[in-house]
Amino acid sequence: MLSAPLSAQPANDPAPLRYSDPAEERRFHDLVAELRCVMCQNQSLADSNAQIAHDLRREVLDLMRQGKSDAQIKEFLVARYGEFVLYRPRVESTTWLLWFGPALVLLAGGYLVARVIRTRASGTGADDGTATDLGRTSRGGEDEQEW
């Protein structure tokens, strides 16, 4: 009866990772900070307490000790779990919108704002009869409404 709520709790790592030197530890932390936990929403491999994150951290350290480069380790994890595992996905045709979409939206917004400002600054609204002053004429220096 108590086992069901306990199984939903985050896993504790029974044996903390031990590093051979500070450089290995720094490289490990830099690498796992760039990798996403495959089970958690928006948590890095370094921040997650899920059991699979513990297992993947051990696997990453083992791969590092086998002499694999960071790129090879990432490639290994992408082959296993897909691009989702990378916090910074590679620039490819499938991720093009992800990388450049915000810049395109910003440029489009800037273009629209500039166009609105230019339209208002030129005063075309009152002269072409289509803007808010439609139906008003100026007589003797004061505005009257024709209705």
Image (cartoon, rainbow, N blue to C red):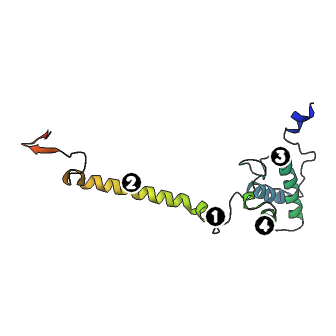
Residue 95's label in the rendered image is 1
Residue under label 4? 75
Q: Going 75% across and 51% down the picture, which residue do you hit?
A: 44
* Neighbourhood count class around disc 3 (C-alpha, 10 Å): few under 14, some 14–19, many 20 upward: some
Q: CA distance from mark 2 to mark 3?
A: 46 Å
Residue under label 2? 113
Circle 4 — which element?
helix
| CB contact under 8 Å: marks 4 and 1 | no
- The tag earlier along the polypeptide, 2 or 3, is 3
Write down the quadrant of residue 2 in the picture: top right
Write down the quadrant of residue 68 in the picture: bottom right
Q: Is residue 129 above or below residue 81?
A: above
Q: Say which amino acid is labelled 2.
A: Val
Circle 1 — which element?
loop
Residue 112: x and y, percent? Answer: 39, 56
* Neighbourhood count class around disc 1 (C-alpha, 10 Å): few under 14, some 14–19, many 20 upward: few
* Neighbourhood count class around disc 4 (C-alpha, 10 Å): few under 14, some 14–19, many 20 upward: some
Q: Say which amino acid is labelled 1.
A: Thr
Residue 105: x and y, percent? Answer: 50, 57
Q: Nearer the viewer, residue 3 or 103?
A: 3
Q: Say which amino acid is labelled 3.
A: Ala
Q: CA distance from mark 4 to mark 1?
A: 16 Å
